[in-house]
Image: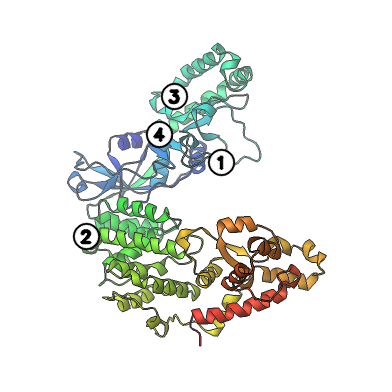
Amino acid sequence: MSYKTTTFKKAIELINSRKMLLPAIQRRFVWGPIQIEKLFDSIMRGYPIGSFLFWKVQPQAVKDYAFYEFMKDYHQRDKQFNDLAPKGFTPTDAIIGVLDGQQRLSSIYIALAGTYTYKLPYYSSTNDKAYPKRHLYLNLLYSKTEDSQFHYEFKFLDDAKSKYCSKNHYWFQVSEMLIWKEAEFNDEWYDEALQELEDLKDDDIDGDRQETINAIKISKREIKKTLAKLFNNIHKNEILNYFEVENDNIDEVLEIFVRVNSGGKVLSKSDLLFSTIVAHWNDGRDNMEELLKRLNLQGFSFDSDFIVRACQMLALENVPLKLEVKNFTLTNVNEVKIKWDRIEDALLQTIDWLVDYGYSRDTLSSQNAVLPIAYYIFNGGSKKSKDDWRRYLSHALIKNLYSSRNDQFLEDLRRELKNNKAFKFDKWLSQSFTSGKKFTVSDEDIEEMLEYRKGRNAFVVLAMLYNFKHSQMNIDLDHVHPYSGFSNAKLKKISIIDDDAKAWQNKRDQLPNLQMMDSSTNRSKNATPLELWVNKIYPNKSEKDRFFSSSYFPAKQSLEFTNFEKFFKKRKEIMRKELKKIFKVQ
């Protein structure tokens, strides 16, 4: 390993000629515009930007690994992922793979050679006008204030905003600096920029033309000094400090990569294992990231950890369910590749079941809890067990069974499910697993459920109680007696004050004052007092009785807000009895 230095200009030339690439073990680009702007301020101020780690790969070895090109034009909606280097790409000389520092180097490349496109607020994500293309600009008339954290103002601007000028604003497109040959070009540039402003009419410019001209003349020396510094930092100063590894053994390189990236919080363990998989599988990252997109389009936020564990759980039955690099050998990754289509189909069908159950990113408290369902589907399990799997998921989430020792518990369940085409959850209710975990719900668990507050746990319990066809409607968790009625002012009007008011406000968000209803009905209810709303929606006695029964309302209890405590107590009793039936508590 050797220590070297180079310029940004030379690095960009290497990137443009495909002599510098990103190994597939790297994550995708994730830096935001403010991070990049701050990076360039640091460069201009002479601050250290950290060292880089490069991997020198000989031409004959390049064909054995997957490499990605640097992203030139980032687009928040349409272009978030790097392109794979062309098939059959074989360089004549050694190439450089970036092992550490790809976020910084990608940012520098985008800023100096490309564009950064992100969404405008308040626009629909499907509207193309919401995504104006932006270049990086430097404000040559910027005056630092005491409150400013920047000494130099860099901004990603679209064409329209870059034309705005004033006594404090004149924007220079940073990528223009790449074509300069010498720092002295700033003399020519300065004269042309000033002449262009003087030739324009006031109506031709966004801002104050004369103020800008005066400011540019006054700041001539400082502007030229700034441009010369920018030129030198790109073309001449060897700011890019790096260590270079020369090794064609992917496993040894991966070990270096893991050690470098596990020192801080740059990558999680699952990210590293994800990188291990794609290091052995050229199309692995594209396939997995595309699957994550499809899974999350249905309202979830699954991550690479979920995909890695799914590959282990479903495809590698004889491999321990531990997130360890040694479990992802070339042989095991080939097994994942062979079974990938089946893995993909199983996970997509699993998500369809979750949607039918009514779950989303806001209500699914454990991604690992989904894996046994996917394993069952992967192995040809019958849809007849779908309701049993719903009961499994409810018990697992309510009992918080995936809070620790996940690997052993998943091993237990996988062993139980092996070759089991017809799953019956009742068998697991009375079973003890080697991990020490149990699905059995106790009286104490029921009492805890009844005190659940509005949120994920309350959703799980109410989903079991209401048993809606979730796929046919959008479901809300709603306060039975409206939230707004529990303000101190409104409680005081009905003589509920001090400790009594606090007790009512505490019960306001607990399960006996929560219900499930479709979103449109909830919007019509809004803050309407309960009794008024029920009488308006269900004027017919038989309809009202059905609603009371399906919503676990006490039949003869007044719905007046003044009787909240009695209503709460009686509804709690009804829910307790029903939950004991559902969860089979003796």
> Dot 3 corresponds to which residue?
183
User: What's the colour scheme?
Assistant: rainbow
Q: Residues within 10 Å of mark 3 (few under 14, many from 20)?
A: some
Identify the mark nearer the N-term, 2 or 4.
4
At 47% from the left edge and 62% from the top edge, which residue is drawn? 470
Question: Helix, strand or loop at disc 4?
Answer: loop
Question: Helix, strand or loop at disc 3?
Answer: loop
Question: Helix, strand or loop at disc 2?
Answer: helix
> Dot 2 corresponds to which residue?
338
Q: Please name which of the two marks, 4 or 1, marks the residue nearer to the observer.
A: 1
Q: Please name which of the two marks, 2 or 3, marks the residue nearer to the observer.
A: 2
> Dot 1 corresponds to which residue?
122
At 51% from the left edge and 69% from the top edge, which residue is drawn? 463
Mark 3–mark 1 Cα distance, whole angstroms, equals: 42 Å
Disc marking residue 114: 4
At 48% from the left edge and 18% from the top edge, which residue is drawn? 187
Closest to the observer, 77 or 489: 489
List x then y, in percent, for residue 287: 30, 52
Q: Please name which of the two marks, 1 or 2, marks the residue nearer to the observer.
A: 1
Identify the mark nearer the N-term, 3 or 4.
4
**Type of residue at label 1?**
Tyr
Identify the mark nearer the N-term, 2 or 3.
3
Q: Residues within 10 Å of mark 1 (few under 14, many from 20)?
A: few
Mark 1–mark 2 Cα distance, whole angstroms, equals: 44 Å
Mark 2–mark 4 Cα distance, whole angstroms, equals: 38 Å
Residue farthest toward the top in the current orientation of the protein: 199
